[in-house]
Image (cartoon, grey):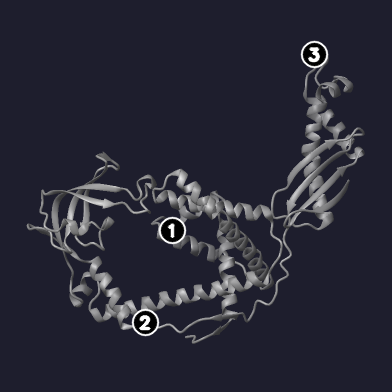
Amino acid sequence: MKSKIKKAEGTSQEIRITLLPATVNEALSEALSDIRAAVTIPGFRKGKAPEDIIRKKHLEDAMKQVKQRLIPMAYQKALDEHGLNPVSYPEISEISVGAEGAIEFTAKVDSQPNVNTRKYKGIKVSGEKISISDSEVDEALDRIRNMNAEFLDLDRAIEKGDYGICDIEAFIDGKSISAKRENVWVEANKEGSMLAMGEELCGMKGGDEKDIEVTLPEGYPDKKYAGEKAIFHVKIRGVKEKKISPIDDGLAKKIGKDTIVQVREELSSQLLERKEQNRKVNMKNQIMEYLLKKHPFSLPVSMVKRQQEVLMKRAGDELKQKGMDEAVINEYKDKLKDSLEKEAENKVRLYFILDDIAGLENISATNNEVDEWLRNLATQYNQSFENVKKYYEKNDLIGGVREQLREDKTLDFLLAEAVITGESI
């Protein structure tokens, strides 16, 4: 066997491999012999047909078997000879059989990039001191008050701040543009209502009907109606008043606590923890930006392409959930293509950098850590740990979890080794 290698785009390598006639002919003889033993030729007992007849009738099948057997073996041998560490399956092309029986083919493969890891300990990051003010706790308490508000039925006209329970149907030029929606809660408040038409409900009572003219916004989900004037026919089914509890021990008991002081202390602790998590995320982002800047190297094109496809699909799925039609989604994805390609390159580059650092520092994810991650996922989705683990094992997803945990631990290590400037805690 002979092979020669040529560099292609990114970390791609093209290997031109030649299987010598002696090797091919030996494999061909074995394939024809196997076929001769298995087939029945009229006029001959099974396995006794002359070799020249077998060759004439089954040469194509035999050569197909030879290629299936020898090409993978030759490809693997070429990898070993050239010291290549592929990160993708090969693209086999340009297969030809010479007059004397030699087989030639090209194997294109993306190989492991040379990261050439630079200084990664002592990276400088900014981490400002964090604290929680009384006003932040007050805002959190106000959100809790609103979440635990009571809504009282009223037998009077709607006033600003009340809620109208409405049946709503939209029309343009007398034609309905959406399905009728029933029992929709609309706040009688311009800022807090859909399409800012809430204040138009003021003065209406149960059973009243009204047409409200609204100019649909440019971001309206159905793009063909964006910017158009529409008539919303509204019928009031009922009126409700929002009653908010005062911030006192009564509110605390509503949410299962003893005193409002206890609630404030717990909220302060939770808000501080959330800020600390955000602070760490911000510092890790600084580390990743530093690593990307300091490690320019060629990337496996196939991996970047696959990552870009994942990002494009995710963007499309998010737009579908918002109700956008296929044409709008495709137009939006076309606009995102370049930025998503850059994002895909960064993700692939960072994967190799962190993988290299993890190897240098002997960082890995243990079985217990994988199980803990799966337990948290099971709890989140109210599933049993056993069922979740079986699903991940069955669908060969455990390796991905282990890789993600290893990457997370590597970033934790880099943050622990970083030099934090500013007012750290």
Mark sitting on residue 42: 3
Mark sitting on residue 169: none
The mark tally for this picture is: 3
Q: Are marks 1 and 2 in contact (CB under 8 Å)?
A: no
Name the element at disc 3.
loop
Where on the picture, by quarter, is residue 67? top right
User: How far separated are the C-alphas under marks 3 and 2?
Assistant: 92 Å
Q: Nearer the viewer, mark 1 or mark 2?
A: 2
Q: Amino acid at mark 1?
A: Ala
Characterize the local packing of mark 2: few (<14), some (14-19) or many (20 or more) Cα atoms within 10 angstroms: some
Q: Which residue is mark 1?
A: 378
Vertical order, 412 against 79 (above or below): below
Q: Can residue 187 be seen?
A: no
User: How far separated are the C-alphas under marks 1 and 2?
Assistant: 32 Å
Q: Earlier in the sequence, mark 1 or mark 3?
A: 3
User: From this viewpoint, which residue is outermost toward the bottom?
Assistant: 423
Q: Which residue is mark 2?
A: 132
- Where is residue 215 drawn, in percent x and y? 29, 52
User: How far separated are the C-alphas under marks 1 and 3?
Assistant: 64 Å
Q: Can residue 92 be seen?
A: yes
Where on the picture, by quarter, is residue 70? top right
